[in-house]
Amino acid sequence: MKSLQSYIIEKFGMFKEQDELVLTIANAIYEDIKQNGIKLGDEYPFTKKFLEDYDFKFIFFNELYIKYTKNNTAYNLRESKFNEEECMFDVIEIDIDFKVYNTFPKIARALTHELLHAYEDLQRRINKVDSLVDVFDFYNKTLKTDNKFYRTLLNNLSKVEQRAYINELSIELEANKFDIFKYDTFEEAYIAAFKFFATKSSFRIYIEGHNVLQKLYTASDDEKQEFVNVYNDVYNSNVNFDIIYKRLIKIYADILKKFRKRILDIFKDYYKKHSEQVENSIK
């Protein structure tokens, strides 16, 4: 029997021109919201031809279809249509919660996360490995619990979601127009940026992992056993609570290292880009 580990592979990186594409689409949506407001059911189609007019070279879909929904933000893998002959999507559908993602930075964040899922699904299909439909079906088949806490915990720790949440970081500084020139040194600006990421971005989900672990540790014996059963079903294992708990501590520590490294890399690139822009404007 396969385990979730065999489905969740960390293999495909972010796609070319990702940030520029996301900012362009998010800006178009937000400008429309400013003029016409926002309501449940609003739809935004973006064609490949429309985006090619902005000189984007790498577009892996013929149409990107964004729909505002209620209580759900997701890459709609059931409605997205893959074209095997052209090795691209005819249609990618992304659903966005209209009550949550209604500002420019939040729209950009949602698109960065969900388009990464779509790109990973594309690469999985091209490389003939399990698609995200397979992953989703397996996950729901083996995750035999309605406990929202357990489902969220295991979902956030999967490699697919880790990658998408880390991917969100790339857009945050640009979308929020983080001002490096408010600070006298690189170090001061980096500390401020790090605090921003820690409180305003997906980084916060994993920083608060100690709260998740504490809740799990202080659960009743029956609740712990329920989680053990869920964990062993999903990972096709046979281990006790203590072993699982130690594994989770290590997983959270490893994730935080990934986030810190990515944040530093993003900040270095952002700082260099905006410093050079000022230097060039002076010249």
Image (spheres, rainbow, N blue to C red):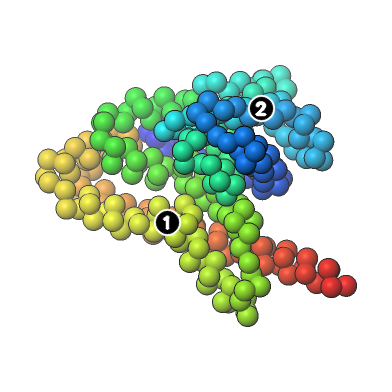
- Look at mark 2 in the image and give the residue it sits on: 45
Q: Amino acid at mark 1?
A: Arg
In the rendered image, residue 17, in percent from the top left (x then y), is placed at: 71, 45
Residue at 79% x, 29% y is: 49
Outermost residue to the bottom: 184
Precedes in sequence: disc 1 or disc 2: 2
- Residue 199: x and y in percent read 44, 60
Is 15 placed above or below 262 here? Answer: above
**Disc 1: which residue:** 204
Instruction: Describe the element under mark 1 as helix, strand or loop.
Output: helix
Q: Report the number of numbered marks.
A: 2
Q: Residue 119 location in percent, x, y?
A: 61, 36
Which amino acid, mark 2? Pro
Distance Cα–Cα, label 1 vs label 2? 32 Å
Q: Label 2: state its secondary structure.
A: strand
Q: Position of residue 83 (x, y in %)?
A: 67, 20
Foreground residue, 6 or 20? 20
- Residue at image position (46%, 38%) is 99
Q: Residues within 10 Å of mark 2 (few under 14, many from 20)?
A: some
